[in-house]
Amino acid sequence: MSQTTTVSKTRHEQILDTIDEVTKISSGLGIAQLEIEDEEINGRTIRLKGRDVVNFGSCSYLGLEKHPDIIQGVVNAVTKYGSQFSSSRAYASVTLYSEAENLFEEIFERPVLLAPTVTLGHLSNIPVLVGDRDAVILDLQVHSCVQTATQLVKARGVHVELIRHNRMDILEERILELRDKYDKIWYMADGVYSMYGDFLPLDDLYRLLDKYDQLNLYVDDAHGTGWAGKHGVGYVLSQKPFHPRLFLVAGLAKSFAACGGVLVFPDERTKQRVRNCGGTFIFSGPIQPPMLGAIIASAKLHLSEDIKKYQAELQKRVDYFVETCKSFKLPLIGESNSPIFFIGVGKPGVGYNMVTRVMNKGFYINLSVFPSVPYKNTGLRIPITVNHTFEDIYNVLSAIAEQLPFALEDNNSSMEDIRKAFKI
């Protein structure tokens, strides 16, 4: 007679099961893994289930995806170079690459490398920059792509640890604990955090950089690039000068309306070492000519005076969103003047219910749920773009304020539960 043995699942398997369940529920409700039905995109609305809804799910903050100069840049590049140039940059690359990198060196006033994506940039950067006798400290909310890249150095035996979000007091405690054991200490964080839209505490960090020579700052500023700073250098450099031990990664797939990542280095020697030794620079494919054309056109636009107009228009909408959110007394988490907003709802069930209700009112918004946020810290993630009208912003917040009490009641929850979950 056979005997069935029940094997308990590992923590990793339990996490995968939870992610799988959350995704199946969201997809089944028709609020995630969607395919838009538009034959042409206008930047403001998308067509879902036979109906046009205002899209509050785009990270194209400056609304440049249909800018005529960028479209023409794509056309010119594909006409000259074709749809692809199929060669690793370790062997050869089209001249568009050097033109694009020269433009970004003008923007950032530092040596740069272009990577096909921000993720691939981290995968080249971090294993080369971090030595075997170094230690890495990750902010708890640093983007997943940074955490993924640090697994490569962790596999080499490098010390990697997480600390609570934006806690500079804890960071300093860890520096004091680790400085006699390791050559360098790397703190890795986001300039603008992708869920709550809150910022890196740069004043405190620069104080620590000046105080501890071993400390190096590695920042993913993908969500800050373009809409902030002179020429769109991003949030970090809009607030502080480039520090000699700052390693910055900017993103082009959001405000720049193109693709790729820009790796910004404090010196030319480090740039060349990453280009020569970075795994994804050797073994991955390049950015293809059409997107290089878009990158060049967008970089030129950001170097012009015109970009200030787009940045100013976005900031007006950001300010209006905050003002209107407060007037409706909505639970806005991590308030800042970035174009990313997060309205807390607490339980995942409330989130599913709310996204469905708001979509029925004519607005598509993103659900932020585990693993993007802790399981009981579900919320509505609402990025703002220049393509949104002030009326759009008022109407979506009005719909959220109207529907939230019903969604809470449906899930046996309350505003007090939200306040407790987010420690408001």
Image: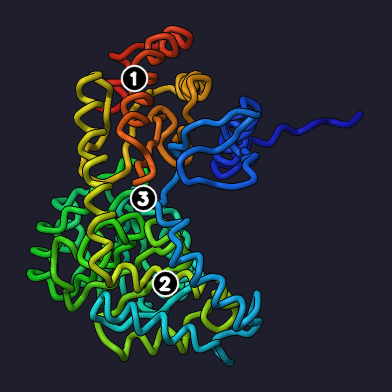
Q: Report the quarter where the N terminus lies.
A: top right
Between discs 1 and 2, the one toward the N terminus: 2
Q: How crowded is mark 2: few (under 14 residues within 10 Å), some or many (20 or more)?
A: many
List the single residue furthest toward the right: 1
Give the vertical position of 57 relative to 59 (above or below). Answer: above
For badge 2, the amino acid type reads: Ala
Residue that badge 2 annotates? 297
Between discs 3 and 2, the one toward the N terminus: 3
Q: Residue at x 49, y 18 (%)?
A: 357
Question: Please, what secondary structure does the residue beneath circle 3 have?
Answer: loop
Residue that badge 1 annotates? 398
Residue 5 can be seen, yes or no: yes
Question: Please, what secondary structure does the residue beneath circle 1 have?
Answer: helix
Q: Specify how the rendered protein is coloured.
A: rainbow
Give the vertical position of 123 relative to 47 (above or below). Answer: below
x then y, percent, for residue 242: 18, 73
